[in-house]
Image (spheres, rainbow, N blue to C red):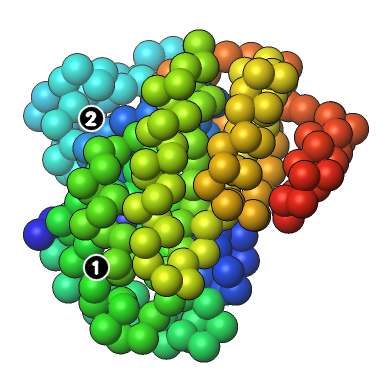
Amino acid sequence: MKVAYWSVGWLSTVDGPGNRVVLYLQGCPAKCPWCHSPHSQYENSPLLLQESLCRFCGKCIEACQNGVHRIINGKHTIDYQRCTACGKCVKACPYSGENTANSVLCLPTVRQEASEVFELLRPQLDIVKSIGGITLSGGEALLQTDSAIELLKLCRNYGIHTCVETSMLLPEEVYRAAAQYVDCWLLGFRNVYLSEKISDDIREDCRRKSDIFKEKQGVCLIARFPIIKGYTDTKEKVTLLMDILLENEVKELELLPCNPHTEHYYTLLGKEVSINITKCIPSKQEIRRIADYFREAGIQVKQ
């Protein structure tokens, strides 16, 4: 079983109950236009370039046999059509490594057996064992179904509280297979936010999957609401989300305002965001209004 692209968020306090070790798994079917981690949508992350750190030494050009890198008039560009993500340029660059934050070139994808990932995480899991647990996120964590379930089993057998963040876009059989190993679900409801028209089919899909999540006794359900102004905050979608939460006894909701730093990874990929992020950021008053709307219905809101 292989796990592609994993990255640990050290002792996160916002990705499930308590303190969490967060494992980000590669691949996502949602393709949300406001996604702040576009590199996680791929099966394997493309090469990332932080051009502002480049010293234009040309080592990457010498190492690459496919002519991927070019430096013209002081600008470093990447031809992604030619790139095979072999990593030779990253190794050759004296200013690159595994740390995305301060590396000119980076290939964040890591492929390992689920058991190997568990062993690597064990020291961090020991830290959070009594104060939190592990959260599988992404991308869509369960897109790599077999590997994710294998890792969840290992964590549960080790006495670790497990949490999975999901878009809710996967088939019911995937959730049914994973549910027995999950103590807490972070529910994305992407079928609600990404649909142009709200239908009874969406409501029924949410109901069926929520029933699966609740089959395990004592499971915690937390909805996550990305507030993207002009996209997810319409009256129709907010009202539908309210109805779905009440119908399925989801009593906790986290509000996630549009990330103002969304453009960062698009820049590293040499792409542009398809929406105007500045216009998508809600004001504090708008966030408070949405929070109050859900609180009045008896739903616990974290913002």
Question: Percent from the top left, x then y, of residue 18?
Answer: 60, 73
Q: N-terminal of the two: label 2 or label 1?
A: 2
Question: Percent from the top left, x then y, of residue 105?
Answer: 36, 40
Question: Percent from the top left, x then y, of residue 61?
Answer: 23, 30
Which residue lies at the image location 29% right of the left edge and 38% below the top edge?
170
Which residue lies at the image location 24% right of the left edge and 77% below the top edge?
154
Helix, strand or loop status at disc 2: helix
Residue 139 appears in the picture as rendered: no
Which residue lies at the image location 37% right of the left edge and 41% below the top edge?
208
Classify residue 215 as left or right of residue 112. right
Question: Percent from the top left, x then y, of residue 150?
Answer: 19, 66
**Which residue is disc 2 drawn over?**
61
The quadrant of the image that shows the N terminus is: bottom left
Q: Quadrant of residue 191?
A: top left
Q: Quadrant of residue 231?
A: top right
Q: Residue furthest right?
A: 285
**Which residue is disc 1 drawn over?**
151
Instruction: Give, as a three-letter code, the residue at label 1.
Output: Leu
Helix, strand or loop status at disc 1: helix
Q: Nearer the viewer, residue 56 or 241?
A: 241
Residue 250 sits above or below residue 123 on the image: above
Q: Quadrant of residue 59?
A: top left
Classify residue 85 as left or right of residue 100. left
Instruction: Give, as a three-letter code, the residue at label 2.
Output: Ile
Disc 1 crowd rating (10 Å Cα; few below 14, some 14-19, many 20+) is many
Which residue lies at the image location 25% right of the left edge and 38% below the top edge?
171
Disc 2 to disc 1, C-alpha distance: 39 Å
Q: How many marks?
A: 2
Residue 209 sits above or below residue 129 on the image: above
Q: Nearer the viewer, mark 2 or mark 1?
A: 1
